[in-house]
Amino acid sequence: MLVSDLRKEFYDVIKGKRVLVLTHFDIDGICASKILQSLFKTDHILYTVVPIQTCSDLVEAYQHHAEQIKHIVLLNCGGCIDVVDILQPEDDIVIFIADSHRPLDICNIYSGEQVRILTKLGDDEEVPAFNDVFRDDESEDEGEESDEEGGKRQRFDEATLEKRRERRLWEQQRNKILFNYMQFSYYGSPVSVASFFFFCK
């Protein structure tokens, strides 16, 4: 979910709560972390900062602090990976991501309330539409029926074959869209600059 109002949807949510800040070991992440730390100190927010470099560091830091926190801030990391799939957090944990690495993972963008993207997308960044990459189909077993011995037998009626054909065409189109979206890696605006302008208002 893309956050539009940082004050309401981010800062007011974490105010008064314990926060885990996982920051990437690069200059942008460290600068953003220092800006956020000074703001947390001003508002007396309890926080833990853990520097990370790899996905395994991210998982290890999360597992080490998972029982103590309900809010995680990822600075300059986590945007290009499906953090819910990798961290497998409880449903009540909220993950805020501020990352300049692009492209952002589709699952993070379209995650409900659990993952919130703090960085704004550029005008030239085109995120695929939800319906182009996610599909809610009926059961995969709809084209099968049970025989007398309890085994599965394929049904080859015309409606089932047409549904399979449509599904295959949709998957081909989805793969093409995702390939075009994820084809190149690049950087958006620096997280530290965005956090400086937001927090210095």
Image (cartoon, rainbow, N blue to C red):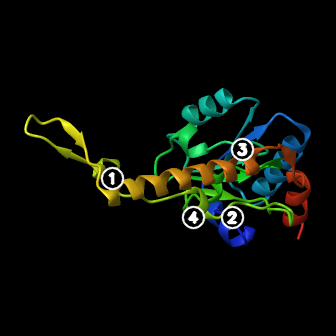
C-alpha span from label 1 to label 4 = 18 Å
The residue mark sitting in front, 1 or 3, is: 1
Mark 1 / mark 3, whichever is N-terminal: 3
- Mark 4 and mark 3 in contact (Cβ < 8 Å)? no
* Residue of label 1: 139
Please determine whether, in this image, residue 189 is positioned above or below residue 150: below
Residue at point 61%, 44% (across, down): 82
Residue at point 75%, 50% (across, down): 180
The residue mark sitting in front, 3 or 4, is: 4
Mark 1 / mark 2, whichever is N-terminal: 2
How many residues crowd mark 4 within 10 Å: few (<14), some (14–19), many (20+)?
Answer: few
C-alpha span from label 4 to label 2 = 17 Å
| Amino acid identity at mark 3 | Cys
C-alpha span from label 1 to label 2 = 30 Å
Residue 201, position as x, y percentages in the image: 88, 71
Mark 3 / mark 4, whichever is N-terminal: 3
Residue toward you, 166 or 157? 157
Residue at point 89%, 45% (across, down): 31
| Amino acid identity at mark 1 | Ser
Q: Quadrant of residue 150?
A: top left
Mark carried by residue 2: 2
| Amino acid identity at mark 2 | Leu
* Residue of label 4: 131
